[in-house]
Image (cartoon, grey):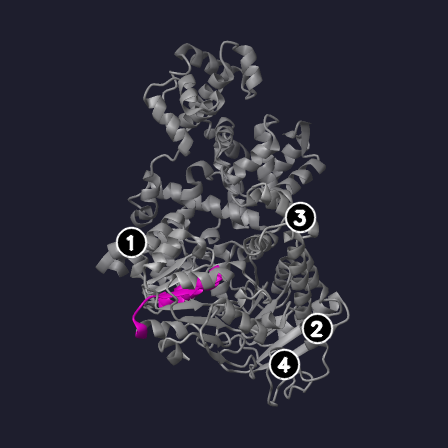
């Protein structure tokens, strides 16, 4: 079983036959549609959102076929699968000797992590060359935004440049030396480039550790997200590293442009039906927009769409039946529409913790240590 | 040659890669004191040239291509007059706002890099290049410099004609590189060929490139030999993402790799002086490609080696690729019908299953052949002629492999050139030194993976 297989099994287990396998594909590649975004949150797998943006559909299908063939999952109907007992025990075993990416948070970090990584990469390469008094070198990052950012950073450091570089080096050491660092820091550090020393490719790292590229990718991403969390939590301990992500984390919420339009109409006080008429869109489309808003904007009030009493009913039922099939909800609370049920679940039930619970159940720290020492 | 450019003459220059091609337009730009427009067909190549200029301290450089995010591109277009070196991809020249901005810049020199792409008979034909004549006119017919590394007489004629060059001064350097010894090794089976490759990469001088026509094979063999031999090997092809490609290029430049197992995507624009050996695991599809690829060796003038590994039937690989490239009569007919009923290009190419190249070819014919009931048969016959021409080019390579005469002679004759005798010419003439005894320049084990602590202290 490959690392990707284990990630897929985790998804199958979480979706538990509620969603087709395409939903998993869209989750991992990070398709920005209301459906995928809702799935990610309703089922508590937003951590995996867009963690494999380049996964090809063909390869994805190939791995799913493998899981079916091995009887790790079984088809319920219409491309919906649930994990089997065999699959479940294989999954638990798998993460006993492979690090589980418990710090991964695709939803929060997917694009930010890439900017953070590119900045880190180019900043280190530049710093290293400056340190060795080399003025010209071929940058490993060609993105003009990243290049501009790095240039500006050095301008800001100004006269104190060399001192800052030394401090930056020290911050990286402090970060990688943390007791709770979840994996080998080499997954990040050895990919960095510098003066007459070009970083390793994913392929070269995978050859060194004798693991596949997808696993390298996840373990890299996992460590990267971990670093971002720690830097963000302790900006005074990592002031220079914090500079790499400060503006990224402050960026305002990014909505799809259609959702933005709907939002402006809601702010003007138009009802759902009115907005659909004005915009010449289906009501269900507007409903999707509203759900996206509820997900993205913590302060977004849903009282306009679901009366308080009904909200409470839905939420109580959610706790009681502990299941996510909408049809079962509907049977319990006929008064609520599907849209209203989804909206309440999204608003109150952002289950981002589910992922962490899973990991703490399945991964005692000592196991983690064992893996790290390997 | 630079003199003729500065004097304002149209110039056609065929000079081997690594002979300071970029100098031909950099110098004149400073002398003429005005902006230069450089059309370049390959994104990676363009990026490399831009970087080389920047590394030399020239900041007024811009590259308009699809790598540049849309906003950045708009910004660059609005400030186009500020730049001294403007690189564009041919696609960008079809955009009105780009053309308008360019016509305001009073371009002093119009440079067409890799000009052989203009010729339908060339191996790398780019339909967009055919529009360059018109663009040149719109820019007020500035003096033109057409650059190419390899082009047969016929292709050179095409270039001059398509670019409306007026009494062009021609500078043709020989395609012959006397410091590169040529040899061909035949195998009886695939497994023998793989063993031969292993022998080559362990006994011949690195750094070197091994060319494959299959990504997968390049990956697989690179992986295998990296772990079973003491050589540091990586694979490179268009399937890798940009960050990984840059790392491999730079590791190679930095002598952190002995061999790169690559498809033809690798090597253009790589300024590495000390490449010692070029191996072709698969034969290229034309002598032009062959000359370009082996020309990456020995730019420092030191002795270098080209080895082509041949297995009977290898010529089938480029031939099959040609078949794949050619749209079928049925596809041509359907393309015509659907386009006539105003279907958009993307839908058409998806629904009749055209590859990217096939779409590009048909799009070109659509632009340049008048649409009437003859269109389908006219396109068909042009496609057939193209195929014959390309097959002829493959046979040129086969002739080079099968010859009992001097290989160097066969090579230069493809380009209508003659030759003087020389030492260490080719395996037919006899290589003086048994070339297996050349010295290794690098000797490394694979265990250069260090701890993160050590890596950080190396970096800082």
* Chain of residue at mark 1: A
User: Mark 3 or mark 2, which is nearer the start of the sequence?
Assistant: 3
Indicate left or right for A191 with B364 as reference.
left
Q: Which residue is mark 3?
A: B333
Compare residues A8 and A91 and report the one nearer the observer. Answer: A8
Compare residues B238 and B396 and report the one nearer the observer. Answer: B396
Q: Which residue is mark 1?
A: A153
Q: Which residue is mark 4?
A: B413
Pick out the residue farthest to the right. B188
Compare residues A152 and B202 and report the one nearer the observer. Answer: A152
Viewer-nearest of labels 1 and 3?
A: 3
Q: Secondary structure at mark 4?
A: helix
Q: In the rendered image of this protein, does residue B103 appear above or below residue A268?
A: below
Q: In the rendered image of this protein, does residue B193 appear above or below residue A247?
A: below
**Which quadrant: the N terminus of chain B?**
bottom left
Q: Residues within 10 Å of mark 1 (few under 14, many from 20)?
A: some
- Does the CB distance between marks 2 and 1 fall below 8 Å? no
- Does the CB distance between marks 3 and 4 fall below 8 Å? no
Residue span colored magenta: B31-55
Helix, strand or loop: magenta stretch: helix
Viewer-nearest of labels 3 and 4?
A: 3
- Does the CB distance between marks 1 and 3 fall below 8 Å? no
Measuring 63% from the left and 67% from the top, which residue is drawn there? Answer: B229
Pick out the residue farthest to the left. A159
Viewer-nearest of labels 4 and 1?
A: 4
Q: Secondary structure at mark 2?
A: helix
Quote the CA–CA distance across marks 4 and 1.
57 Å
Q: Which residue is mark 2?
A: B398
Quote the CA–CA distance across marks 2 and 1.
56 Å
- Does the CB distance between marks 2 and 3 fall below 8 Å? no
Q: Is residue B89 magenta?
A: no
């Amino acid at each position: 079983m490959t690392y990707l297989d284990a990630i897929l099994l985790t998804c199958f287990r979480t979706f538990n036959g509620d969603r087709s396998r395409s939903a998993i594909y869209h989750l991992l590649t990070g398709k920005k549609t209301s459906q995928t975004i809702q799935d990610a949150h309703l089922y508590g797998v937003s951590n995996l959102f867009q963690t494999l943006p380049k996964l090809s559909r063909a390869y994805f299908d190939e791995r799913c076929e493998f899981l079916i063939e091995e009887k790790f999952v079984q088809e319920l109907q219409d491309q919906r699968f649930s994990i089997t007992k065999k699959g479940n025990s294989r999954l638990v075993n798998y993460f006993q000797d492979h690090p589980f990416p418990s710090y991964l948070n695709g939803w929060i970090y997917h694009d930010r992590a890439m900017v953070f990584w590119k900045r880190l990469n180019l900043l280190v390469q530049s710093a290293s060359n400056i340190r060795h008094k080399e003025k010209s070198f071929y940058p490993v990052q060609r993105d003009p935004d990243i290049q501009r950012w790095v240039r500006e950073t050095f301008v800001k450091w100004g006269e104190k440049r060399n001192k800052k570089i030394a401090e930056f080096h020290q911050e990286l050491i402090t970060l990688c030396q943390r007791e709770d660092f979840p994996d080998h820091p080499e997954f990040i550090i050895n990919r960095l480039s510098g003066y007459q020393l070009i970083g390793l490719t994913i392929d070269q790292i995978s050859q060194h550790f004798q693991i596949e590229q997808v696993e390298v990718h996840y373990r890299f991403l996992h460590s990267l997200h971990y670093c971002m969390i720690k830097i963000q939590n302790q900006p005074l301990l990592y002031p220079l590293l914090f500079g790499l992500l400060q503006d990224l984390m402050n960026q305002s919420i990014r909505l799809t442009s259609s959702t933005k339009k709907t939002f402006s109409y809601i702010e003007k006080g138009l009802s759902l039906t009115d907005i659909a008429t004005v915009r010449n869109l289906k009501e269900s489309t507007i409903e999707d927009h509203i759900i996206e808003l509820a997900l993205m904007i913590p302060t977004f009030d849903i009282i306009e769409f679901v009366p308080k009493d009904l909200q409470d009913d839905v939420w109580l039922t959610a706790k009681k039946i502990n299941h996510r099939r909408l049809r079962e909800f509907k049977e319990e609370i006929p008064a609520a529409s599907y849209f209203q049920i989804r909206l309440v679940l999204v608003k109150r039930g952002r289950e981002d913790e589910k992922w962490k619970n899973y990991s703490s159940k399945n991964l005692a720290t000592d196991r983690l240590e064992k893996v790290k020492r390997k | 040659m630079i003199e003729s450019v500065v004097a304002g003459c149209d110039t056609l220059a065929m000079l081997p890669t690594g002979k300071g091609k970029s100098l031909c337009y950099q110098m004149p730009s400073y002398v003429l004191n005005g902006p230069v427009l450089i059309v370049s067909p390959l994104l990676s190549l363009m990026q490399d040239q831009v970087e080389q200029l920047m590394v030399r301290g020239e900041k007024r450089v811009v590259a308009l291509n699809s790598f540049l995010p849309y906003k950045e591109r708009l910004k660059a277009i609005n400030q186009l007059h500020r730049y001294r070196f403007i690189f564009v991809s041919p696609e960008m020249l079809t955009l009105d706002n780009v053309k308008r901005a360019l016509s305001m810049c009073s371009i002093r020199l119009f440079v067409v890099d890799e000009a052989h792409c203009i010729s339908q008979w060339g191996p790398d034909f780019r339909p967009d290049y055919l529009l360059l004549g018109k663009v040149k006119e719109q820019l007020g017919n500035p003096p033109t410099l057409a650059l190419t590394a390899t082009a047969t007489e016929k292709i050179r004629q095409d270039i001059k004609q398509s670019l409306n060059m007026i009494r062009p001064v021609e500078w043709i350097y020989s395609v012959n590189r006397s410091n590169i010894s040529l040899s061909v090794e035949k195998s009886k089976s695939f497994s023998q060929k793989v063993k031969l490759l292993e022998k080559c990469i362990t006994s011949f001088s690195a750094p070197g490139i091994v060319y494959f026509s299959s990504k997968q094979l390049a990956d697989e063999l690179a992986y295998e030999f990296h772990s079973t031999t003491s050589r540091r090997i990586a694979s490179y092809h268009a399937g890798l993402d940009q960050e990984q490609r840059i790392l491999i290029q730079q590791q190679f430049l930095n002598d952190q790799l002995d061999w790169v197992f690559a498809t033809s995507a690798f090597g253009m624009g790589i300024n590495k002086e000390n490449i010692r050996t070029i191996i072709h695991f698969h034969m290229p599809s034309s002598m032009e490609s062959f000359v370009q690829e082996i020309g990456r060796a020995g730019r420092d003038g030191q002795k270098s080696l080209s080895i082509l590994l041949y297995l009977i039937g290898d010529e089938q690989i480029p031939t099959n690729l040609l078949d794949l490239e050619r749209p079928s009569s049925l596809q041509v007919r359907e393309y015509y019908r659907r386009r006539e009923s105003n279907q958009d290009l993307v839908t058409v190419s998806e629904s009749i299953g055209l590859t990217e190249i096939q779409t590009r070819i048909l799009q070109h014919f659509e632009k340049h052949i008048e649409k009437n009931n003859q269109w389908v048969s006219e396109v068909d016959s042009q496609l057939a002629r193209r195929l014959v021409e390309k097959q002829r080019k493959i046979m040129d390579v086969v002739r080079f492999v099968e010859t009992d005469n001097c290989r160097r002679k066969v090579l230069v004759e493809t380009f209508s050139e003659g030759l003087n005798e020389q030492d260490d010419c080719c395996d037919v003439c006899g290589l003086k030194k048994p070339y297996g005894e050349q010295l290794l320049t690098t000797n490394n084990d694979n265990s250069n993976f260090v701890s993160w602590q050590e890596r950080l202290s190396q970096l800082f």
